[in-house]
Image (spheres, rainbow, N blue to C red):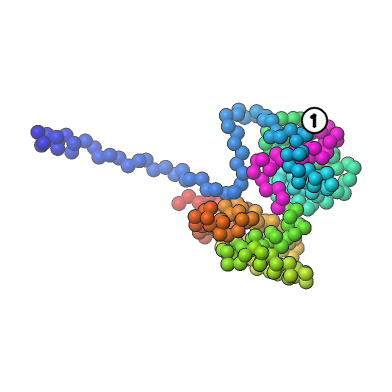
Amino acid sequence: MYQNDYQKFSASPPPSAPPYTSIQPEVATGIPIISTGNLQPGTEVPWSTCLCGCCSDVSNCCITCWCPCITFGRIAEIVDKGAVSCCASCAVYAALACCACLFSCSYRTKLRKQFMLKGCSCGDCLVHCCCETCSLCQEYRELTHRGFDMSLGCLTMWCPCVTFGQIAEIVDRGNTSCFVAATLYAIVGLSKWGFCLSCFYRTKMRKQFMLEKSPCDDCLVHWFCEPCALCQEHRELKIRGFNPSIGWHANMDNQQGVEVAPKVEEGMNHIKKIIT
């Protein structure tokens, strides 16, 4: 009896290993991912808030009423995917003055096409001409609801020490606090040599993540355009899963450890997928 059972089980083939798959788990990049659900391609969706819902974000409403160029600059930088800085868009908008609505309505059209929002080009122009403030607030809220950090560009322009402090704390792995780094930057910045301190941290950050020198030497990048360089470094940390605004220790609590970056040179804001 037992012999027959042994022969029966021994004759059956051994369980095979699960088939190998080359699909790798997705890595969190910090870039907002827009879920389309079960929508068919080409289907337009409504805006997340109504045109007259300005009071749902009082701070943005006040900024837009008194200085719409700031809100527009923030919107344009996100819609253009960083190709045009917040400061540049803000300056162009302010220079156009009374004709600015004709410029800003083109960005409403671009935003709609990117996120498949309901509307038409003619409607975009009418909305901006009739109520520029409400339309800018609605676009700002739409991007905020989709996970974008809208305040970074202008914050760096007016108070770069804050952005630098957040970057320095992450790059130094918590050995230097955001407050200390920001204070040191502000003191050095009074002599117009703040870029010398910040370019040193750009070099440290490049070595940590094996980033290539782009578009030129670190000191030259910070010397020619300090706000742009700081914004780029801030975005790079966010893309790599860090939240610079909460500091190093809070990031460690959230991530439970940091993975070492692969030793492959790559450009800022581009993470290469490596399949071994």
Identity of the residue drawn at 67% across and 29% down: 44
Examine the rendered structure and indicate whether residue 9 appears above or below residue 155.
Answer: above
- Which element carries disc 1, helix, strand or loop? helix
Identity of the residue drawn at 65% across and 60% down: 166
Q: Position of residue 102 (x, y in %)?
A: 84, 39
Q: Is residue 244 left or right of residue 185?
A: left
Identity of the residue drawn at 52% across and 48% down: 27
Residue 61 location, quadrant = top right
Q: Which residue is mark 1?
A: 123
How many discs appear?
1
User: Visible in this render: residue 262?
Assistant: no
What's the magenta region?
A: 123-152
Q: Position of residue 200 (x, y in %)?
A: 65, 68
Identity of the residue drawn at 83% across and 38% down: 132
Q: Is residue 61 magenta?
A: no
Q: Is residue 12 left or right of residue 175?
A: left
Figure quadrant of the N terminus: top left
* Disc 1 residue type (three-letter): Gly
Q: Is residue 56 left or right of residue 22?
A: right
User: Visible in this render: residue 180?
Assistant: yes
